[in-house]
Image (cartoon, rainbow, N blue to C red):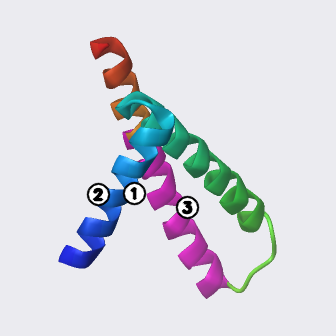
Amino acid sequence: SAPMANRIQRAWVDLKLVRGSDGGVLSAVAAAIRTTKDFYRQALSMDFPPDVQAVLERQAESISDSYDQICTLRDMRGRAA
């Protein structure tokens, strides 16, 4: 939605002001996603009902894909600098 896109854009600008560059922002985002991946890794080692486990696995895969994309963007920015 437009309001959500506006909030995301504003957050990106705020992060750039704090971190100083797109690469810095991407590094900060990668670190946050890495922390989330660790959380899911721990959660997946617990004994949940199969339906909950399936949801956690799908979410963990999505987070892992996002992490890979952010790292690729960060690395591309680093080479372009």
- Using a 10 Å C-alpha cutoff, classify the residue at mark 1 as few (fewer than 14 neighbours), some (14 to 19) or many (20 or more): few
Name the disc covering residue 9, or none: 2
Say which label, 3 or 2, has the lower sequence index.
2
| Location of mark 3 (residue) | 60
Say which label, 1 or 3, has the lower sequence index.
1
Q: Is residue 32 visible?
A: yes
Q: Position of residue 67 (x, y in %)?
A: 47, 45
- Using a 10 Å C-alpha cutoff, classify the residue at mark 3 as few (fewer than 14 neighbours), some (14 to 19) or many (20 or more): many
Give the quadrant of the C terminus: top left
Tell me if residue 27 comes above or below residue 33 in the rendering.
above
Give the quadrant of the N terminus: bottom left
- Asked if disc 2 and disc 1 are in contact, CB closer than 8 Å, the reply is yes
Tell me if residue 45 comes above or below residue 3 in the rendering.
above
- Whether residue 50 sits left or right of residue 72 in the image: it is right
Q: Secondary structure at mark 1?
A: helix
Q: Is residue 1 visible?
A: no
